[in-house]
Image: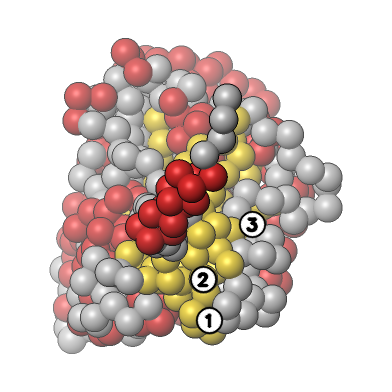
């Protein structure tokens, strides 16, 4: 074969003439600006919203703003090692966290990494932090109770498995205490719990973890932590990460409880991110999609139908109000998404009524159908009597001559208030609650001094535990109060009053 050098030379020259090079920025980008936990990246045209991007120092970021010629990236951690001109790579992965039974008893950060010095987590699998909520056809009505162990809630504002019940009130009114009591009360009930702490002091969360350990609740609980010192990006993704961990168990057919403490700080973190990304501010400087921020999170709580495993995810979001203003932007947003709210009043708290639940503002839209029949019978008149008492108490301040009926109602109302008072971290079994509410409803506390009502409760429950345990067993088994059972309770109350001198 003879090689023609002229032809080869001619071909090479023609190729050089027509050669053109267009740089491809589809898979590799460049940092053009960085600061305040936000990076602006040029290139990466193939990036998806919410995709993880990798920086040279091993730090990850999440793409949030997809502009025409650049991407707004939220950095998951410190931006100290990132500078202008650094290359950025696509990972092709969305933000995800480890899930499964190995997460039980662990304290993790918003990325699912352990921070409890108990070694690494060997995960069963991983789940994306952003998941589509179960559809309407995948759900069934809420019909099973989730017992909180708090009389005021289980009687007046009951929570069902798969419900979203908002806990709302000013700072230092006992919102977290209610959530922690509810977690403690799930011991032995085969309910997994996830506690998500958003923007709280590390010392506060350490105290909560200590309580959970002391009560044995940590064995079935996962704590997801994004403290006040963590970047806004981690505070933003923390509740979604916690929800992904909880969802894994729900889709396996388990009952799960998740607490978001609190979504006010979550909205503030998202506002900070949005303003840094130069998104247009709306009311109170929050971005326009702040409603969607919480709705896509809370809609993931569900009571699944049997075809999809029958699992439940109950959500207890917490919102902090300012001066009791429940008509502010974030409170009204979350109230409209949830199935009811437990409103805690600062005045009640300061008066020593704890939990400081205001039954007038508190409501459970679906929990009533999840109450056991015995509790439903006893709690029905309780709410009306409580409301009447509050109204009479307000008017009686202006009148000196009160008729006997009014005095009786006021005395009964005072006893209702006293019975509903409950110490922190001391949840009460539903059978014990039924017994105490029965004594209240039937007027057995009428002749007992207010200061001795808690002593009566202690002696009454102790007596039943030692001499008439079959009563509690029957309530637990049937969930109802038969006439025969009521007679037995009456006999026990009479015996306790006589034995302990309450008559």
Badge 3: residue crowd in 10 Å (few <14, some 14–19, many ≥20): many
Q: Which residue is depicted at the point 53% across and 49% down?
A: 91
Instruction: Measure the alpha-carbon separation of dots 1 and 2.
Output: 11 Å
Q: Which mark is residue 109?
A: 3
Q: Secondary structure at mark 2?
A: strand
Q: Is residue 7 left or right of residue 271?
A: right
Q: Is residue 184 above or below residue 43?
A: above
Q: Secondary structure at mark 1?
A: strand
Badge 2: residue crowd in 10 Å (few <14, some 14–19, many ≥20): many
Q: Earlier in the sequence, mark 2 or mark 3?
A: 2
Instruction: Measure the alpha-carbon separation of dots 2 and 3.
Output: 28 Å
Mark yes or no: residue 145 visible.
Answer: no
Comparing labels 1 and 2, the label whose residue is closer to the camera = 2
Horizontal and vertical percent position of residue 251: 44, 25
Horizontal and vertical percent position of residue 364: 26, 47
> Which residue lies under the disc numbered 2?
30
Horizontal and vertical percent position of residue 449: 48, 60
Mark yes or no: residue 395 visible.
Answer: yes
> Which residue lies under the disc numbered 1?
34
Instruction: Measure the alpha-carbon separation of dots 1 and 3.
Output: 24 Å
């Amino acid at each position: 074969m003879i090689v023609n050098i002229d032809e080869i030379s001619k071909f090479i020259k023609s190729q050089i003439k027509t050669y053109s090079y267009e740089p491809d920025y589809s898979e590799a980008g460049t940092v053009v600006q960085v600061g305040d936990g936000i990076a602006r990246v040029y290139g990466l045209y193939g990036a998806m919203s919410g995709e993880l991007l990798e920086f040279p120092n091993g730090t990850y970021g999440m793409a949030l703003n997809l502009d025409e010629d650049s991407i707004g990236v939220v950095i998951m951690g410190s931006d100290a090692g990132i500078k202008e001109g650094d290359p950025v790579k696509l990972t092709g992965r969305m933000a995800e966290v480890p899930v499964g039974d190995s997460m039980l008893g662990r304290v993790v950060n918003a990325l699912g990494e352990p921070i409890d010095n108990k070694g690494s987590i060997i995960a069963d699998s991983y789940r994306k932090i952003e998941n589509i909520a179960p559809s309407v056809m995948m759900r069934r009505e809420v019909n099973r109770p989730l017992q909180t162990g708090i009389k005021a809630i289980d009687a007046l504002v009951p929570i069902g498995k798969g419900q979203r019940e908002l806990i709302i009130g000013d700072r230092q009114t006992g919102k977290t205490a209610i959530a922690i009591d509810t977690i403690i009360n799930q011991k032995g009930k085969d309910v997994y719990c996830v506690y998500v702490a958003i923007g709280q002091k590390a010392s506060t969360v350490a105290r909560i973890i200590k309580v959970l350990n002391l009560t044995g609740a940590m064995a079935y609980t996962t704590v997801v932590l994004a403290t006040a010192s963590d970047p806004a990006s981690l505070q933003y993704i923390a509740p979604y990460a916690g929800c992904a961990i909880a969802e894994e168990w729900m889709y396996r057919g388990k009952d799960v409880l998740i607490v978001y403490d609190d979504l006010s700080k979550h909205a503030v973190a998202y506002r900070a991110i949005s303003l840094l990304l130069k998104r247009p501010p709306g009311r109170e400087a929050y971005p326009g999609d702040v409603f969607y921020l919480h709705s896509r999170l809370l809609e993931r709580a569900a009571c699944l139908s049997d075809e999809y495993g029958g699992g439940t995810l109950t959500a207890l979001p917490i919102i902090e109000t300012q001066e009791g203003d429940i008509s502010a932007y974030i409170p009204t947003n979350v109230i409209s998404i949830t199935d009811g709210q437990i409103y805690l009043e600062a005045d009640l708290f300061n008066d020593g009524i704890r939990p400081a639940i205001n039954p007038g503002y508190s409501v459970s839209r679906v929990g009533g159908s999840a109450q056991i029949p015995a509790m439903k019978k006893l709690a029905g008149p309780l709410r009306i009597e409580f409301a009447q008492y509050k109204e009479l108490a307000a008017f009686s301040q202006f009148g000196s001559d009160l008729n006997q009926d009014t005095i009786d109602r006021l005395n009964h109302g005072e006893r209702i208030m006293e019975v509903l008072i409950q110490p922190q971290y001391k949840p009460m079994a539903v059978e014990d609650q039924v017994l105490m509410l029965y004594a209240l409803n039937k007027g057995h506390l009428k002749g007992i001094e207010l200061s001795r009502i808690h002593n009566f409760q202690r002696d009454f429950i102790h007596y039943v535990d030692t001499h008439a345990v079959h009563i509690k067993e029957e309530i637990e088994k049937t969930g109802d109060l038969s006439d025969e059972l009521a007679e037995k309770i009456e006999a026990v109350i009479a015996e306790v009053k006589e034995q302990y001198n309450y008559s």
